[in-house]
Amino acid sequence: MNDIRLPKELSDRLDMASAVLEQARSVKVRVISHYDADGISSAAVLSIMLRRLGLSFHVTMAQSLDARLLEGLNAENGKCFIFSDMGSGQLELLEKLQCDVIVLDHHRALGDSDRIIHINPSMFGSNGTTDVSGATTCFLLAQHIDEGNWDAAVPALAGAHGDMQHLGGYRGLNADIIQGSMKRGIIAERKALQLQGETLSDSMLNSPEPYFRGLTGKAEIFRDYAGGLGIDPDVKYSSYSEEDIRKVASALMMTLASNGCDYENVSQLLSTQYFQQKTGRSIAEIASLANACGRTGNYGLGLAMELSDGKAVEEASGHRLEYNKAVVSRLNELEEGIEEMNNIQFFRSDDPSLAGALCGLYMAFIGRKDRPTFSYSLAGEVYKVSGRGTKSLVAGGLDLAESLSSSASKFGGHGGGHVIASGATVPKEHLMDFLKSVDEITGRQIKGASARSQ
């Protein structure tokens, strides 16, 4: 692993996981992964690794780890379990499993375990928000086991992209994987428009990312806008001249900037992208398809797509179009404004599968940038809450993992994640109390950081 620099403590844990898998030939390995783009990508990396090892395995995607899920897993005697893109916050629950357990995660760890092989680079100097994702953590194990697993770098990087770790350029362990993959001819880089779809019409009418307030999903307004550019919006990007690319990029970047978007999101519009040499597909495209599959419950399809199943790629594209239309429609509504407290802004999402995406997109492209955004969705007797911030807010003291975890625990719920993106589950009767607590903690975080800097 000369291309990837690892501290000895982390390398030792990879050795332990390798030894466990070497002894797992008589059992079925169970992979439990998160259901978003990073989680599906994590499962793809592990599938490549386990197939190459010749092991029998079964993959399950889960929205969260809870006691009910663990009860079902515990009934599967004689198994080896791998939890990917989840687990660092539920180690006590996982210790109840009566078998070998490997956790591959990048979220904030709530302690450690002597019984579980707990592999989380954020415990050893890496930033789990910017430097390493769940999928790139899985890649560390895959590459540690077999040099031939460098082909798993493509889904690994798609996972990092899905967790928005490409913004501002890949860093840390992600950057090491980028460099190693380019050196081996697995991926190539080039500057390109960061837009979904083949034409400007596709991008502006059917894609929520980037989202252009006042334009996205609004056909008549967009046609007038496109006419002012002197560009045929139905011509494929592949036929654009360099002048066309500059003209479109300049206009769209000005639109994002005028909407108050952070420099990072504005500059990303025309930036270095990475493409799989074998298929020509971009890492961004793979991440986008995986995200749509995860959010629409088509987990197996997303996994097959990441493993380069041609039919799955085509079918995933159809699901993404429907998913995108639903997101764009709701974002159009949210342009009218959402609720606020002193330090946070929030809205209801009637579709839980869209809540996290809506929250992140609203924060990045529509809402106020001086306070974090939260969305909440009713799921039975609880509310699922998603929270998103910005790097500027984090630099100013924001820690969503702390505020959501602390607030949820007050009311019989649970929460956690990253400082910039986190989630929680709270009993439905305590939603407003929970949000008031998050508002108070957020205020203290920002004011405390401001006072310390003076």
Image (cartoon, rainbow, N blue to C red):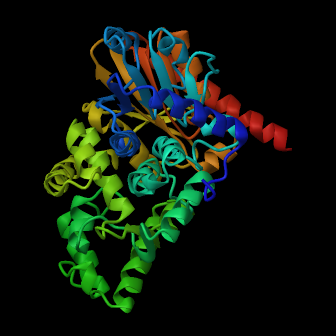
**In the shown orientation, is residue 182 left or right of residue 81?**
right
Image quadrant in which you'd find residue 288: bottom left
Relative image position of residue 113 (x, y in whole percent): 62, 18
Residue 439 visible in the displayed image: no
Labels in figure, total: 0
Image quadrant in which you'd find residue 51: top left
Judging depth in this view, the residue of 284 and 412 nearest the camera is: 284
Note whether 434 is above or below 3 in the view shown. above
Judging depth in this view, the residue of 264 and 4 nearest the camera is: 4
Q: Residue at x 45, y 77 (%)?
A: 191
Relative image position of residue 281 (x, y in whole percent): 30, 66
**In the shown orientation, is residue 189 left or right of residue 428?**
right
Judging depth in this view, the residue of 3 and 71 nearest the camera is: 3
Relative image position of residue 78 (x, y in whole percent): 36, 13
Q: Residue at x 41, y 78 (%)?
A: 249
Judging depth in this view, the residue of 429 and 340 nearest the camera is: 429
Image quadrant in which you'd find residue 12: top right
Q: Residue at x 32, y 8 (%)?
A: 75
- Image quadrant in which the C terminus is located: top right
Note whether 76 is above or below 129 in the view shown. above
Note whether 442 is above or below 261 in the view shown. above
Q: Residue at x 40, y 10 (%)?
A: 67
Note whether 421 is above or below 21 in the view shown. below
Relative image position of residue 206 (x, y in whole percent): 22, 60
